[in-house]
Amino acid sequence: MSGIVNWAVHFFMLDEGPLIWLSDFLIGIASVGIVVALTYFKLWKWLWDNWLTTVDHKKIGIMYLIAAVLMLFRGGTDGLLMRTQLSWPNLHFLNADHYDQIFTTHGTIMILFMAMPALIGFFNIAVPLQIGCRDVAFPYLNAISFWLFFVAAMLFNLSFVVGGSPDGGWTSYPPYVENAFDPGPGENYFLVSLQITGIGTIATGVNFLLTILRMRAPGMTLMRLPMFTWSVLITSIIIVFAFPVLAVCLALLLIDRDFGSHFFTISAGGMPMQYVNLFWIWGHPEVYIVILPAFGIFSEVVSTFSSKKLFGYSAMVVSMIAIAILSFIVWVHHFFTMGAGPGVNSFFGVSTMAIAIPTGVKIFNWLFTMHKGRIEYKSAMLWAVGFIPNFLIGGLTGVMLAVPPADYQYHNSYFLIAHFHYVLIGGTVFGVFAGLYYWWPKMFGVLLNERLGRWHFWLFMIGFNICFFPMYFLGFMGMQRRVYTYPAGYGWGVINLIETFGAVLMGIGFLVFVLNILWSARYGERDVTGDPWNGRTLEWATTSPAPHYNFAIIPQVKGRDAWWLMKQAGESINGPKGIPFKPIHMPNNSGRPIIMCAFFFIAGAGFVFQWWIPAIIGLIGVVVTMALRSFEYNDHHYIPVDEIEETEAAAGRL
Amino acid sequence: MANTHSAVHGGHHPVDPSVPAEYHSEENSLRIAGFWIFLGSDLVLFSCLFATYVVMHGSVAGGPTSKQLFDVTGFTIETIALLFSSFTCGLATYEMRRGNRNAMIAWMIITVLLGYVFLGFEIQEFVHNVSIGATMQRSGFLSAFFTLVGTHGCHVTLGTFWMISIIIQLAKYGITPITARKAFIVSIYWHFLDAVWIFIFTVVYLTGKVI
């Protein structure tokens, strides 16, 4: 009996101290609260019918974004814990083990469970509307992608209170993460949950590639696509070719850990550097997967709030294609210090620096778009304008890191930490916030508050610079990444304290954003026109939120900024008056994606804990749900004309 | 039904009646194109496994080398079985185009059986290797070998299950644009596995027998 109790205490980490107890308590309270609230308000059926089984890209996009904001909170809390620990020399607020786990989950969550779903959420929200179609190419697959991400995120977060989190960093380099040095389930959580979400991401890549190539409204030629959609097209291509590399990389390491093979061990002929190569062959394109859609959002925002068409459209497209190609031939710059030799390092140094050229072209294009424009500093535009100098700092320090001999000096120092936070926060996170303020009315039919939006922007932007700018200097002063504490007398203490203060400001900025969401839900200005920003692209041509079928009649596109042209010509989105509506074909909702992904979760837990029976049950469940789908022939319905007329009349489009 | 997806597109892509049945609707064409893209990503997956195998080929850690391990008769039979299955799979598509459901199903059954012949020899090879101590835990080379060849084997196994489910649907519904599309997609999957096997045959087995 006491054996079982001991096992359970260890398994649920009750011997790990008050932080875990507090987390257990909060998770318990939140779960019970959600269940009680759903039951009390009788919302289970509503939740199942409207959300859990939906294949509607607009709802899937909203779910992605809700999950991403929650994960931003989780990852941000990790960040604040780390900043607290580092705020002064010789602190022991966290011990070394906990610190390792927290920097690992911080990085992994921020990139794979925050940035990715936030951007994929925007893919879903905006792309089908921007190209004038009624859903993505494969709506059912889209639901599977979301639920794969969701169960993977849940599995990963569970590690914090069940069995222990991974502690090898988000890059998770062997040989440290092999069983010999890092036993226990923690690292398996990393490998399995990334594998599951990665499968979903590949499906998303295929889905949006096909959606954009094949589902465009008539007249919407490739060179008339809104720039965000272009960025999604390029990103999807990168996803399709980069994510399988991650799948292999994770699978090989998991086989090492679960089945004792020797891919990356230091004994029996294993080659740890092969992991590092594979990881970054995915990892560097991944960086562009999370930045190109943000570039796309900025392009839309800058153009809309300058009341001008985007400057240098073709150059923007060519730059993104160039960045996509270059992204696959720069991976070695993540480990110049491996010692590949001057020839190899020079090649990768130069190819890395070359990326600055197309990126610079884009920066100038945004500036020229604003030049002589009628600029409105709405919250979304603030993020776009803030992005340019911050991203520039991140980008230029990136060029410094690309010089191999110099990189030997600041490799893995806080200089690097500062660099990638400047590009990932100054680029991606600013882009996500810009997108949220910009598309919020389209998602929920209500505008976020501008005053709170400005507070959010300034607190976050100033806090961000206070937190990360000094890190460049700390790096020069010799502070290495991933140290959990440092002795007094290096002169790092005060700088770290200032950084922690900046991090707290960012946290407050985030809370203002949450307040903004809550305030606006109740008191926010309703978007009755569907076009609150005097927008240029087709998503603004329809109601906010868009009707289930998006467009009653598929629009005819006559040029770039299609909706702007229609407004100039005084045309309706439904074309000339009197075109009769036809019944609209839509895919049916399905409960199978979420059930299938529950089986993925079971299989994943099996691989994490090496419980082979749940693993096999889970995998069989996955195959069976796939087979059931193959035998499903009635998976669509028609929206009758009456219903379309009713909706269109209510929107004033008859 | 055949025209369902054109509604999604507002009907601006008219269906050309001269194209084969599997392309007889926007949705079918979309799904086939989507599957080609998926195969592109699967190809990247195999490329990584090949790269890892090539890098680790010499990491035998004092254990058996590829030269000692590979059995020419075994992998030749595997190769012939799989290449023939690709041919019979092509014949099934040919009969599908001619509208002969029964002949099509017959060729697909032969394809599946040849797939099992291939798998049988592969399993036998793996079991033999394990019995003489050449397990995937023995060395980096063997880890990479079992993973690359095993991943292909898993693909083939899944492909046979998939093909059986399509055979059942063909028997149930006949050759319709939908079943034709499903059969066509499983056939390009099958040919893809054949193409990957040609690389395994060359890079792993033939090369492994020489160096």
Image: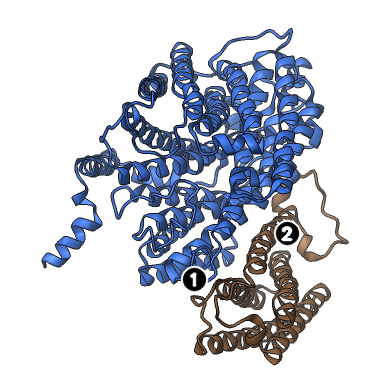
Residue at figure coordinates x 51%, y 50% from the top left: A589
In the depicted structure, whether residue A420 falls above or below residue B115: above
**Residue A29, how many percent across, how many down?**
23, 40
**Amino acid type indicated by mark 1:** Ser
Q: Residue B36 carries which label?
A: 2
Helix, strand or loop under label 1: loop
Q: In which quarter of the image is the N terminus of chain A?
A: bottom left
Q: For residue A135, which quarter of the picture?
A: top right
In the displayed structure image, the side of residue A134 where residue A576 appears, left or right: right
| Chain A, hue in figure | blue
| Residue nearer the viewer, A587 or A147 | A147
- Quadrant in which the C terminus of chain A appears: top right
Dot 2 falls on a residue whose secondary structure is helix
Colour scheme in use: by chain
Mark 1 belongs to chain: A
Q: Position of residue B111 (x, y in %)?
A: 70, 82
Q: Are marks 2 and 1 on the same chain?
A: no
Relative image position of residue B98 (x, y in whole percent): 83, 76
Task: Look at the image and tell me whether residue A634 can be seen.
Answer: yes
Three-letter code, disc 2: Trp
Residue picked out by circle 1 = A261
Name the colour assigned to chain B in the rendering: brown
